């Protein structure tokens, strides 16, 4: 895999790289349990975001119920409301067979890209969980970072502008994840480095899918709005942050 070639468009898209102060904090072995725990939760949240988009804008009742059923065991585990399921067995149940089909090309594009994203994010979820188990890192609930909430505060409140903005936010979240995997990987042990670098291709594709969907639903060029959210995202990444998380800002 050509890592620089994958990451290069990401670095041009984002308005800033991850500050070295965050990398220095994240590479501390004492941070690893928190880093992996938040990474695990981030994968679930990415799947939830994709699910909500399909349910709200495309899915019929059958498809909506199927999406909820896919994620429910993961959510129950993450929110400590149930026992740990067999994630490998669960993953084999995920597919597009129960998803709705639509005559709307954009709607079908949303279904196809988001269902693939859900499957990949949930795959990453149990991969992180396996790493935690191998290292005897217990899963403990943690609070959410300010990052996604900070992005969503800037989303406009009437359609289709709400949808366009949410898709652009999704693009930045996926792009930042890709950039951080690449930035942090050289400082990790061999197994974690290999794992984080293995995630780059899918994360890079996810950000491009979100941008394509956003432009497809908009009658106007979204470039100005993309730049606006790039500035919002960069401020969250470069300003002091009191909590350490995978998408947190500069350690305060």
Image: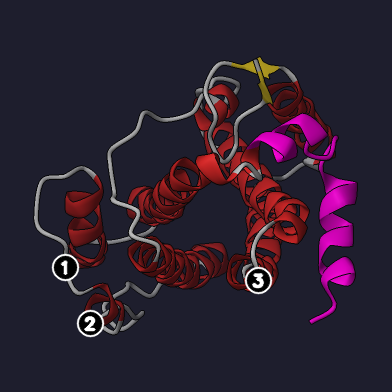
Q: Position of residue 235 (x, y in %)?
A: 74, 21
Residue on which disc 3 sits: 190
Determine which of the numbered discs, if any, sits on residue 85 in the image. Answer: 1
Q: Residue at x 36, y 63 (%)?
A: 129
Determine which of the numbered discs, if any, sits on residue 62 in the image. Answer: none
Compared with 70, 89 (above or below) is below
Q: Residue at x 35, y 54 (%)?
A: 137
The foreground one among 46 and 18 is 18
Q: Residue at x 32, y 72 (%)?
A: 100
Quick one: label 3, few (<14), some, or many (20+) residues within 10 Å?
Answer: few
State which region is magenta. Answer: 1-25
Q: Are marks 2 and 1 in contact (CB under 8 Å)?
A: yes
Rendering quarter of residue 188: bottom right
Q: Are marks 1 and 3 in contact (CB under 8 Å)?
A: no
Q: Residue at x 18, y 63 (%)?
A: 69
First in sequence: mark 3 vs mark 2? 2
Q: Is residue 226 covered in magenta?
A: no
* Separation (CA) of disc 2 from disc 1: 9 Å
């Amino acid at each position: 895999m050509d890592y620089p070639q994958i990451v290069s468009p990401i670095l041009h898209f984002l308005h800033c790289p991850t500050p070295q102060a965050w990398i220095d904090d994240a590479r501390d072995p004492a941070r690893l349990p928190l880093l992996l725990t938040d990474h695990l939760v981030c994968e679930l949240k990415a799947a939830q975001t994709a699910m909500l988009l399909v349910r709200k804008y495309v899915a019929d009742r059958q498809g909506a119920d199927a999406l909820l059923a896919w994620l429910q065991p993961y959510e129950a585990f993450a929110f400590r409301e149930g026992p740990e399921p067999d994630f490998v067995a669960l993953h084999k149940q995920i597919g597009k067979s129960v998803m709705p089909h639509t005559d709307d090309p954009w709607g079908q594009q949303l279904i196809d890209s988001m269902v693939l994203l859900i499957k990949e994010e949930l795959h990453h979820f149990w991969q992180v969980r396996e790493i935690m188990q191998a290292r005897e890192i217990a899963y403990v609930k943690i609070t959410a970072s300010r990052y996604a909430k900070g992005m969503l505060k800037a989303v406009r409140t009437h359609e289709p502008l709400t949808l366009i903005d949410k898709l652009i936010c999704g693009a930045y979240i996926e792009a930042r994840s890709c950039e951080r995997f690449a930035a942090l990987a050289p400082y990790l042990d061999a197994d974690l480095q290999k794992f984080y670098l293995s995630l780059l291709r899918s994360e890079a594709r996810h950000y491009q899918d979100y941008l394509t969907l956003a432009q497809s639903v908009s009658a106007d060029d979204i470039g100005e709005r993309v730049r606006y959210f790039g500035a919002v995202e960069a401020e969250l990444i470069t300003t002091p942050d009191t909590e350490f998380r995978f998408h947190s800002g500069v350690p305060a």
